[in-house]
Image: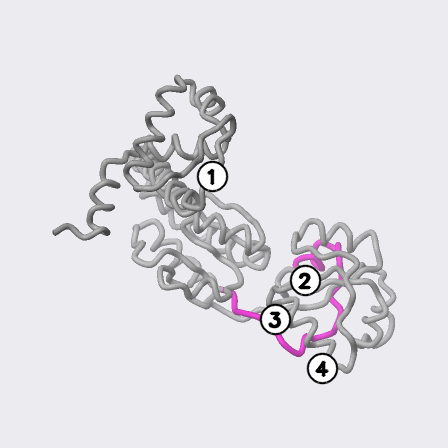
Amino acid sequence: MIEESDRLALHLRRLRLRHFEILLAVARQGSLTAAAQALDCGQPAVSQWLAEIEAAVGVRLFERGRQLKPTPHLAPVLRHARRVVADGQRLQRELDAVSAGAQGVVRIGTMVVASAGLLPRALLALRASGSPMRLEVVEDIAQGLWERFERRELDLIVGRLDERAFAPHIEAQALYQDPHCVVAGRKHLLLRGAPTWARAARHPWILPPRQTELRRAIDATFLQEGLPPATPWLESAVPTVIQRLMQATDCLAVVSGTAGRYYEELGALRVVRLALKYDVGPIGMAWTRGDDSPALVQVLGALRAAVA
């Protein structure tokens, strides 16, 4: 007798990449008519594709009406659809790259802590070695990178590792420690004389969002110094926003040591000689477990060598 899980697997094998592209379009547009227009095809065809998807998964994904209303079953199916479509797009890019003489494509997501030093050194080494590969790099905060990674839009994350890097389907390697530091505008009053946390507490702060590891480390440092946690003037983890506001205000912020040194080299900000009592995870890299593509393996090796 066929088990229910086996039966579902048999039905899912009937679905093609086009089914998932149709589903994503319907979810994005919110109606069959709008999806048909976006896909440049007839509404009956879109309706038929959607019916085939629902028949394959065995549940209703939308309640029909003038506007489609998602059912609770839609979210997990959409996550799977995004991965399938992203894998298809990745395959096409890799085939194009190989046809052009490259080993493959590696899509890298990086944080400022790595893009200011580690990643450029590794990329320059790869270029000098003549490695035939195509590289794509995007910079974002951790939350944005992990969301892209889960959608299969990235092959590798280079930056500060947190608990998300230790999921069962992920391979991760810590490369080095990079303690955070406090930064201020170049003429900030806190730079006059010996800075203390008590003096720092009197100034406005730009802090990372609540419930992040770094925010908890900052709050714990204030408490360890016998001070109440700083009240943020702004909560943000966007590096460009933080840098510009720091130059125009008397705010203080906490950034990685690498970013702090980078801002000092640019003449944009100054590092304040205050050390957090607690800090967060190491700098490292994370990729999908089992991904042993030659291009990715070379990038990983270049990153390890760049640290050495």
Under circle 1, the secondary element is strand
Mark 4 highlights which residue?
Answer: 224
Three-letter code, disc 2: Gly
Mark 3 highlights which residue?
Answer: 179
Residue interval drawn in magenta = 260-283
Of residues 257 and 197, the one nearer the viewer is: 197
**Residue 38 rendering spot, x and y as whole percentages:** 47, 23
Q: Is residue 73 magenta?
A: no
Q: Residue 70 bears which disc, if any?
A: 1
**Residue 272 rendering spot, x and y as whole percentages:** 76, 69
CB of mark 3 within 8 Å of CB of mark 2?
Answer: no
Q: Earlier in the sequence, mark 1 or mark 2?
A: 1
Three-letter code, disc 1: Pro
Of tags 1 and 2, the one toward the viewer is 1
Q: Is residue 15 above or below residue 208?
A: above
Residue with the most extreme left position:
1
Are there few (<14), some (14-19), or many (20+) residues within 10 Å of tag 1? some
Q: Is residue 263 magenta?
A: yes
Under circle 3, the secondary element is loop
Q: Is residue 305 left or right of residue 276?
A: left
Of tags 4 and 1, the one toward the viewer is 1
Q: Is residue 66 left or right of residue 94?
A: right
Q: Earlier in the sequence, mark 4 or mark 1?
A: 1
